[in-house]
Image (cartoon, grey):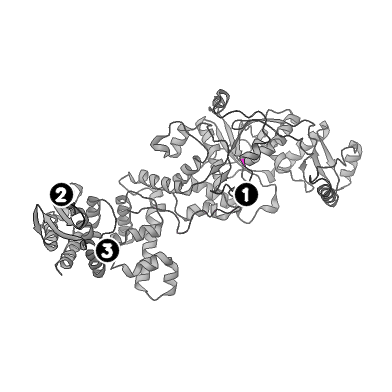
Amino acid sequence: MSGLWLARRPVVSFRRACLSLSSTRFASIIRKPDSGHSPGASNRTKLPDEPARTRFAPSPTGYLHLGSLRTALFCYLLARATNGQSLLRLEDTDQSRIVGDAESRLYEDLRWAGLSWDEGPDCGGPYGPYKQSERLPIYREHADRLLEQGHAFRCFCSHEDLAAHQKESLQSDGSGGLYPGTCLNISAEESAERAARGDPHTIRFKSSDTPAEVRDIIYGLYRKKNVEDHFIIIKTDGFPTYHFANVVDDHLMKITHVIRGAEWLISTPKHVELYNAFGWKPPKFVHVGLLVDANRQKLSKRNMDIGIDSYRDAHILPPALLNFAALLGWSPSNPPRKGVMTLDEMVENFSLRFTKGDIVVNMEKLAFFQKKHCQLLLQDSTRNTKVINDFMVAPLAKRIREVQKSQQEPDSTASAQCLGAMLADLVPSLGSPLAQMTGSESEVEDYVFRLIKSSRGYAMDVDETIASNRYLLWRIPTETLQTTYKTMMGPTKSIALESQETAPAQLVDHFIRRFDKIDGQSWDTVELQRAVDDTVKGKKIVFEVEGTDGGVDGGWKFLRWALLASDPGPQMVPLLELLGKQETMRRLKAAQEISVS
């Protein structure tokens, strides 16, 4: 039986990306890595004793994607699990990359996912956060401090000079060239004078002669083989670079734990050197594994197929997507229901037990979580839940109305294009809509909810849900019932009812007489279960089929043919309850006419 739902097209289309940074590359530059099973590693993965203060710091340059949602979720879970705070910061210093309404789209995606953010110093409200572009004087103040202390210097090299140096280095030794140190020896007086008269310049950090060490909760002790370049911290336009603003903001926001993708581990020594230069204590670093496809290629942020809007458009439940994202690299110790968790349960079970190395994304697991979270939501006997209405009932009811419109306008090219191939091919096999599907919008949605509930919330595509439930929404055409009857009866040699040989039409009459005894007001689970037990339970109906000995229990199969033309569907009692007495009796009588002919 079908239910709800994945997209009409694959939610994610993985493409090969050239930016892959595999765990083997990390292995070549990690010094003395700690084993994931060592006592030290075990201690590292425990939650901190003090409240953690985390931040989610996206660059609002495009869609929130699966990897950034996972980062946001881990930051949220760590803060909530320790009674700490999670803050939202927009890293928008690269103004050239911000496109259109990227910021508002980011807020929309976060709200949809159900993640909220605390208020905090310099952080505004939950969705009115701290923006780096509004804090330029603060970065300049801190850059000036490094200049005064000799940890930074102004660089007046032109872009053309640096490009020429890089080209020459590539040709000579293939290195690409570090900064040649041209402006390192300019005196403080000359540097200040040239800056005062408006000479274009950047501010560069004076990196240490010794590679900095990073202690990471996942990767252990990490150090690059080579020293850092004298990297830029303030650009010619006065904006800070990512690395500089990141460190200043994390310190001023009192961030205790930085959670981000493992691709940032290679840049972390820069950040540690900045912390050291300011005399600040670095936060704890947690670099989680890269998300890769089945070909071990990194999922790309620029691949719009993995934008959160794709999942929203596909009617994926937010709790299902969060559950899916949480287990991409996190290993809870004793998860409930084999890993199926609500957001509150994730908080309750959270730890820092993350997988080291790349994480292969398996979209089949998303379908599993969709199914399970549908079931959790449908345990409630009512449909007065916004998530159920918005993600289950409304999309299915809307799509059903589109199919009904196409039935009324069979020659309309627009209707066919709107439906797509699957439903366009389905339309000719449909009879008239059930009475339950011709009432008011509220009545139709009530029936759709009951259909979803009877299907036990199996997660599938909306169109496939309609196709698999076609005869719970439309009547069965006579020719379809005839064709499926011949298929069912083809290998059947004889039928026995209560050990007495009987004709197919008499067998249908057996069902009609028993179900007709139930008053329409008593057409409920208890009475229907009794009727089903009386008619088919315990091999009351036995089919002698070619190639079998002793006959087979055929009552269930025969009754399902009469009610659904042998389509799969809910269990028998929920099916009868959903159809109602009037439609059940109509179908049984139609089946009787077919079995007589």
- Vertical placement of residue 42 versus 378, above or below: above
Mark 1, residue position? 60
Which residue type carries mark 1? Pro
The answer to which of marks 1 and 2 sits earlier in the sequence is 1
Q: Is-magenta flag for residue 130?
A: no
Instruction: Indicate the position of residue 143 as horizontal and vertical percent values.
Output: 78, 37
Tell me the residue at 38%/58% (across/down): 464
The single residue placed furthest to the bottom in the displayed view is 411
Mark 2, residue position? 539
User: Foreground mark, 1 or 2?
Assistant: 2
The answer to which of marks 1 and 3 sits earlier in the sequence is 1
- Vertical placement of residue 276 versus 368, above or below: above
Which residue type carries mark 3? Leu
Q: Secondary structure at mark 3?
A: loop
Question: Which dot marks residue 518?
Answer: none
Q: Choose top left, top right, bottom left or bottom right for residue 372.
A: top left
Left or right of 217: which side holds 413? left
Left or right of 415: which side holds 306? right
For disc 1, the neighbor class at 10 Å (few under 14, some 14 to 19, many from 20) is: many
**Which of 489/185 is in front?**
489
Which residue type carries mark 2? Lys
Instruction: Indicate the position of residue 64 as horizontal and vertical percent values.
Output: 57, 49
Mark 3, residue position? 434
Where are the magenta residues, as a range? 1-22
Tag 3 near tag 2, CB within 8 Å: no
Q: Secondary structure at mark 1?
A: loop
Tell me the residue at 15%/64% (across/down): 592
Instruction: Indicate the position of residue 288 as horizontal and vertical percent values.
Output: 58, 38
For disc 2, the neighbor class at 10 Å (few under 14, some 14 to 19, many from 20) is: some
